[in-house]
């Protein structure tokens, strides 16, 4: 088991063991306790737990950081609907990568992505950094919706870049992703401006009786 958090006693000055846990401290010298641990119990345990400590920053190995991110992404306390959407997007990315380069009616473009254990933390980080908003339209992305146009979709920011990595992935509405990829970001942005201008016009009071 990896140590992921650590702390040191606040000080100086540092508290003396014989003052904080006098009973347990006196038992350390007993013959039967040599080489063993002596447990502080009762009020002495409470005294130890009440001491001031300062957390220290650990330089975790990359493998440990990856595990912690993966654990956080699939933690039982995480929103079940969000976890399901993250898993769905990660599996879809893996399928696209596996099919890349295959010949069919057209040759699938080459794509690359981290393994599934790295993809899920990556997508989870993106979701939280975006605060659940679509970067393309700035609208809220509902989780667990039955409307496929609104469901979360992993979008490559630069479609010419086949990599699903931290620098090239964002989570958008499926409809925004498809529209951007089919018509290009410029035409998508122009269409979005028109839609928003119509919404603004509807909010303005009418001059007609």
Image: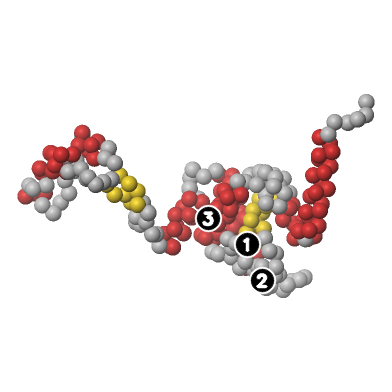
Determine the image quadrant of residue 2: bottom left
Q: Residue furthest right?
A: 209
First reached walking from the N terminus: tag 3 or tag 2: 2
Q: Nearer the viewer, residue 171 or 207?
A: 207
Q: CA distance from mark 3 to mark 2?
A: 23 Å
Q: CA distance from mark 3 to mark 1?
A: 15 Å
Can residue 79 be seen in the rendering of this structure? yes
For label 2, count other residues whose C-alpha is less than 10 Å away and answer few (under 14), some (14-19) or many (20+): some
Q: Residue at x 37, y 56 (%)?
A: 58
First reached walking from the N terminus: tag 1 or tag 2: 2
Quarter occupied by the N terminus:
bottom left
Vertical arrangement, residue 39 with respect to residue 4, above or below? above
- Residue 83 % position (x, y): 56, 48
The answer to whether 61 appears left or right of 208 in the picture is: left
| Circle 1 residue | 168
| Circle 2 residue | 110
- Residue 158 % position (x, y): 68, 64
Q: CA distance from mark 1 to mark 2?
A: 15 Å
Q: Residue at x 58, y 53 (%)?
A: 126
First reached walking from the N terminus: tag 3 or tag 1: 3
Check if mark 1's residue and mark 2's residue have beta carbons within 8 Å: no
| Circle 3 residue | 121
- Residue 130 % position (x, y): 61, 49
Q: Residue at x 84, y 36 (%)?
A: 202
The answer to whether 151 appears left or right of 27 in the picture is: right
Vertical arrangement, residue 59 with respect to residue 46, above or below? below
Q: Nearer the viewer, residue 99 or 200?
A: 200
Q: Residue furthest top?
A: 209
Q: Residue at x 6, y 50 (%)?
A: 31
């Amino acid at each position: 088991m990896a140590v992921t958090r650590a702390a040191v006693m606040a000080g100086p000055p540092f508290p003396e063991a014989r003052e904080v846990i006098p009973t347990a401290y006196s038992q350390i010298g007993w013959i039967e306790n040599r080489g063993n641990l002596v447990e502080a119990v009762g009020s002495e345990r409470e005294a130890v737990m009440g001491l001031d400590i300062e957390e220290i920053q650990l330089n975790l190995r990359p493998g440990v950081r990856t595990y912690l991110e993966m654990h956080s992404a699939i933690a039982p306390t995480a929103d079940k609907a969000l976890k399901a959407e993250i898993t769905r997007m990660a599996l879809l990315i893996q399928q696209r990568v596996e099919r890349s380069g295959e010949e069919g009616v057209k040759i699938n473009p080459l794509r690359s992505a981290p393994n599934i254990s790295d993809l899920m933390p990556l997508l989870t980080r993106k979701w939280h950094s975006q605060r659940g908003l679509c970067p393309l339209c700035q609208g809220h992305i509902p989780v667990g919706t039955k409307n496929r146009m609104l469901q979360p979709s992993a979008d490559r920011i630069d479609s010419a870049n086949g990599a699903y990595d931290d620098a090239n992935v964002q989570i958008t509405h499926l409809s925004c992703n498809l529209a951007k990829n089919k018509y290009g970001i410029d035409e998508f942005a122009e269409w979005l401006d028109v839609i928003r201008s119509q919404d603004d016009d509807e909010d303005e009071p009418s001059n007609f009786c």
